[in-house]
Amino acid sequence: MLSPNGVFLDCTFGQGGHSREILRRISKSSKLFAFDLDSEAKIASKKITHKNFKFIQDNFKNIGNYFDKESLDGILIDCGVSSPQLDNTLRGFSFRGDAPLDMRFGESVKKTCEEVINNYSERELKYLFQNYGEEKQSSRIAKKIVTIRKKTPISTTKELSDLVISVKKSFKKIHPATQVFQALRMEVNDEINNLKNCLEASKRILKKGGILVVISFHSLEDRMVKNTFKEKIKYHEKDIPFTNDQLQTPSFSISKVFKPHQEEIDFNPRSRSSKLRVIRKL
């Protein structure tokens, strides 16, 4: 169990659901910091008036710039897109509706989805759909995109969604464009590299005995969590000198993966692919 006393960090504020629950459970003397790049999240954060809460509008890859070594007792990372971002069709994250292909988490993100779709090569698009979306028909979809954009640029979510449907044709429960949209969103926002930087910073700023909780929605994300914190034993030649810092590398224990129960999935269908892991710094 983690003590309710300490300094805590919510790396992905969204609309503040997790932050509010953390504030409800920690002591009055504890502090909670929350990060989010989205300006809409900043607006939502103003509704929390707790004196020991502070919102920071920045990418969670930069958390290491704000906290000293071993200064945090608990860190939460909830990967991916938030429900409000998905529900706002004008943001371009959703295949439901017709909006510009944007998909940026914040205005500081350099490229839009429209730029990726219309400028990446067929090979690059195939790689994205295959690796970030785990899309089985990645090759056919990439080929169709390149064929269509030669005539006219693909600029809206409906155009892209209809294109994917025309390739996949039939589907059951999950919309056929789900994996393609996921892959493009991950590329636009550089999600894998940002998560990697955040995890590496977490290793340094987490106190001994502190806990990191990561909720992921993609096998790449979960694999990165496991690989980052998996204890690696290195053998050194006995005559080579090492500093104390090199010899006293902190180790971590990582939990098995926790998945949502059917009751949770029924209540929140978007949680169906989520995986939760708990990492403790020893």
Image (cartoon, grey):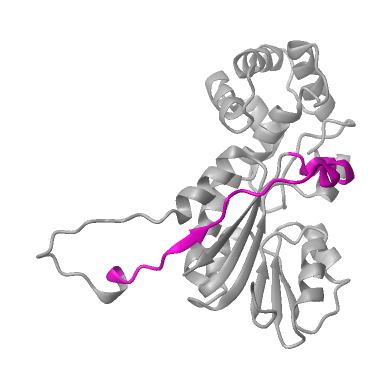
- On whether residue 106 falls in the magenta region, the answer is no
Q: What residue sits 70% from the left and 29% below the top?
A: 179
Q: Residue 91, located in which quarter of the rendered image?
A: top right
| Vertical arrangement, residue 199 with respect to residue 30, above or below | above
| Vertical arrangement, residue 240 with respect to residue 229, above or below | below
- On whether residue 252 falls in the magenta region, the answer is yes
Q: Which residues are magenta?
A: 246-272
Q: Residue 27, located in which quarter of the rendered image?
A: bottom right
* Foreground of the two, 175 or 55: 175
* Foreground of the two, 172 or 33: 172
Please give left or right for residue 5 compared with residue 24 in the image: left
**Residue 91 seen in the current view:** no
Quadrant of the image containing the N terminus: bottom right
Label count reads 0
* Foreground of the two, 7 or 117: 7
Please give left or right for residue 114 compared with residue 21 in the image: left
Q: What residue sits 82% from the left and 69% below the top?
A: 20
| Vertical arrangement, residue 37 with respect to residue 89, above or below | below
Q: Position of residue 143 (x, y in %)?
A: 62, 13
Please give left or right for residue 205 compared with residue 106 in the image: left
Q: Position of residue 45 (x, y in %)?
A: 82, 68
| Vertical arrangement, residue 280 with respect to residue 79, above or below | below
Q: Position of residue 60 (x, y in %)?
A: 62, 60
Q: What residue sits 70% from the left and 35% below the top?
A: 182
* Foreground of the two, 12 or 103: 12
Q: Position of residue 269 (x, y in %)?
A: 84, 40
Q: What residue sits 63% from the left and 19% below the top?
A: 136
**Residue 82 seen in the current view:** yes
